[in-house]
Image (tube, rainbow, N blue to C red):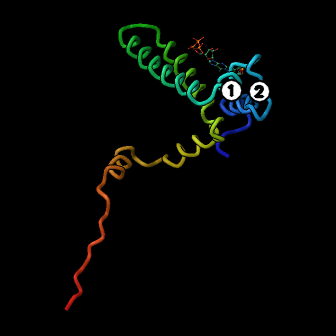
Amino acid sequence: MTSSPTDPLLALMRVIESRLPDRGGDPQSSYVARLLHRGPDAFLKKIGEEAAEVVMAAKDAEHGADRNRIVCEVADLWFHCMVALAHFGLSTDDVLAELERRAGTSGLEEKARRSAPPIVPTITDSTP
Ligand SMILES: N=c1c2ncn([C@@H]3O[C@H](COP(=O)(O)OP(=O)(O)OP(=O)(O)O)[C@@H](O)[C@H]3O)c2ncn1[C@@H]1O[C@H](COP(=O)(O)O)[C@@H](O)[C@H]1O
């Protein structure tokens, strides 16, 4: 377990999970249940939109606009990603565990490892 029980991300994750269709989430009374009921296309579209809004808020902030808009847009993006995680039976704990796994490994090192050419075994000719 990566997060503590008081972690706001964990608390929100549990609320989102409680809105899953097989947990009785009601699309009439819950935005999350409605998104989950509509299926992946609905929340994946929102993730794309919210990601674009993060970019726009950051570009606006570069030109003097309120930086707090970035916070709001990132919150919307995280929230919709969490809905996607719940749909696929995953949670913020899985993401935090992956980030923990990466801790201490330089991003440059990791990038170099990803783009390294595959190791091809050398075949030695043993015919007499
Ligand atoms: N954190 C959020 C949260 N962040 C954003 N949103 C909703 O996400 C949508 C953001 O979409 P937009 O900004 O594009 O607004 P919009 O144009 O109205 O959205 P669409 O019509 O395109 O869906 C809005 O409807 C927001 O209300 C959220 N809805 C819910 N939560 C959390 O989820 C919990 C459960 O919500 P319900 O399932 O609705 O009870 C809530 O108590 C909150 O803690």
Residue name at image x 68 percent, y 26 percent: 37
Q: Which residue is mark 2?
A: 25
Where in the figure is residue 118, as x and y percent of width and height? 32, 59
C-alpha gap between disc 2 and disc 1:
8 Å
Residue 83: quarter of image:
top right
Where in the figure is residue 52, as x and y percent of width and height? 44, 20
59 relative position to 54: left or right? left
Task: Report the front residue among 120 and 110.
Answer: 120
- Residue 37: assigned label: 1
**In the rendered structure, which amino acid carries the disc numbered 1?**
His
Task: Report the front residue among 8 and 52.
Answer: 52
Residue name at image x 31 percent, y 63 percent: 119
Asked if the residue at label 2 sits under 8 Å from ligand 1, the reply is yes
44 relative position to 10: left or right? left
56 relative position to 78: left or right? left
Up the image or down, 97 lies above or below 57; here it is below
- Residue 64: assigned label: none
